[in-house]
Amino acid sequence: MRFKFYRKARYQVFGFILVLMLSLSFGFRAQGQTPVSSAAKQVLESYLEIVRQEKPEFSGFDAKSGERFYFAEREHSRKGDSRSCALCHGDDPKSIGQHFTSGKMIKPLAPAANIERLTEVKKIDKWFRRNCKWTLERVCSTEEKGHFLTFLYSF
Amino acid sequence: MPVTPTLKIKVWDWPTRLFHWLLVFSVSGAWISSFREYLLMEHVWFGHTVVGLLVFRIVWGWIGNGFARFREFVTGPQIVWEYAKMRFRNKAPRILGHNPLSAWMTVSLLLVLLGITLSGAVTLAGEEWIGPLAKYFSMEQGRFAKGIHVWLSYALLSLVTIHVLAAFLESFALRENLILAMISGFKRPPLEVETPLEKDKYSNGIKSVYPDVKLQYWFLSGFVLVVFALTVGVSFDYRTPLTQEALAEQQSPEHQLYMSECGSCHFGFHPSLLPHRSWEKMMSDLENHFGEDAWLDAETTQAILDYLGKNDAEHFQSEASFNLMENVADNELPLRITKIPYWLMKHEEISEQIYKRKSVRSPLNCGACHGYAEYGSFEDGHIRIPK
């Protein structure tokens, strides 16, 4: 008698919807990788085209090379400090970073943790331009940028 | 003449006594908390208590018992003068409630406190943008009110000194512990001297002690409500939601553009912290932005410059911008906010150790300690230095 409550039709419908939502959310989690945004897809395709023009045998961007690039340290010629992407964005791109000089908190870089990342072509270009110069004192090559984006989507 | 020890008269009813000691508590609290800027919110809390108490006392002055009613103890200048003459010749009768001189002390204390709380509220609204009045008062009005607030406070301190001294001296002169009377409420009946003045007061007092019990209990609840609503409610609301709502109104798409472009690498400094000429200079050479390349396309640069032009120190006056600009000459071109004399003066006590903390990292990181700094508010009550 005590469980009569659950047998009412409308509660069964609620329960069904609840179970459905839970399983769906777990399903998306189980997928593991964040879907690539249309902006990032567009950028990656154009990068691949540019790289293939020079190296027709190029197999594609991989996260491992991107990870190496992300952690590679380089001494700044004027400031003398050792800089890398990880210096400000943190060892884990899924967590909050902190700007090395200004102390400003930086939202996670990986789209898995911050859905707004890599959703605008203009912003992707701007930040590559600015931060490659800050970290490496040069522009990044198309190949490096492709590996880097692939690495960020590997979470 | 010996006095029957059992015979006592209730002069100060309990709401008056509670009022008196709560006022002592909150005025001392307000005075002590005014010494440190970070105690501003506590200062405001005490100020609210004073307002609540004043409201109570003024109402109680009409509906309280005979010794508490203004009508019963406030007298004209002639009687005050007569009494003063008698008192200094030591021939004055002992008066059960307020004597004509202390009556005017009470009235002036109440009036000065009213002035202090009103000017304090305007200061808070104009200078710090806190509270419901924040929209109605400008920076200059706030500063003007602060001047009044400070001078009235000195006046209050002198009045309090006289009041306390008088209470002690009269206690010795009348051989009656007046301070204790304000705690217990009881006084010795006036048996030694019978004067018309005294007789009047006496009979009035006796007749109107606890004139209406129901009224008193009704007032008990009103009193408790007023004090608590004004203190706990209002002052705690100030700490976040009200201020936050007032400041959120200032956000616009232009503001968001500015924050996303200029607040990604470093803290998004509020435009009001620098004058227009400084922003123009800075935006004209973003490729050499304090040794970094912060290049932006021409369109974005112009959009941000437009936003800055509407919110710079000349247009968006806050306490911080007002003070920062006060000692910057028109021909100076400040670019680093942290090099402006007022900034340096205000941060003198902050040690290098604090800037080195991981949670702060740099003096540029305003928001690490100043809550709401991104809205241009550097209100003292929101300063929290992180560990």
Image (tube, coloured by chain):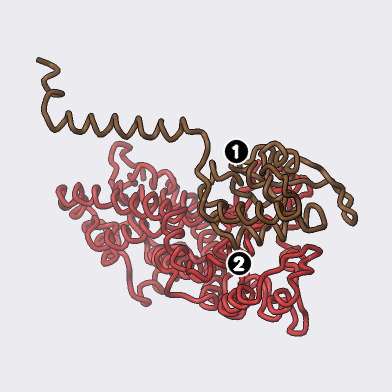
Chain colours: A brown, B red
- Name the residue furthest bottom: B331
**Chain identity of mark 1:** A
Residue B33 visible from this viewpoint: no
Rendered residue at 79%/49% (across/down): B352
Query: Which of the image's four quarters has the N terminus of chain B?
Result: top left
Rendered residue at 51%/64% (across/down): B156
Instruction: Please state the horizontal and vertical placement of residue B259, each as a whole percent of the image.
Output: 58, 63
For residue A77, which quarter of the picture? bottom right
Q: Mark 1 points at which residue?
A: A154
How many circles with numbers are drawn on the protein? 2
Instruction: Nearest to the eye among marks 1 and 2: give it.
Output: 1
**Horizontal placement of B183 versus B194: left or right?**
right
Query: Which of the image's four quarters has the C terminus of chain B?
Result: top right
Q: What residue type is labelled 2?
A: His
Q: How far apart are marks 1 and 2 (CA)?
A: 37 Å
**Horizontal placement of B99 versus A152: left or right?**
left
Q: Is mark 2 on a helix, strand or loop?
A: loop
Near mark 1 (Cα within 10 A), the count class, few <14, some 14-19 or many ≥20, is some
| Front residue of this view, candidates B239 and B43 | B239
Rendered residue at 13%/33% (across/down): A10
Instruction: Please state the horizontal and vertical placement of residue B274, each as a whole percent of the image.
Output: 67, 73
Instruction: Please state the horizontal and vertical placement of residue A111, each as a whole percent of the image.
Output: 55, 45
**Horizontal placement of B227 versus A49: left or right?**
left
Q: What element carries label 1?
A: loop
Q: What residue type is labelled 1?
A: Ser
Q: Name the residue under label 2.
A: B270
For residue A72, which quarter of the picture? top right
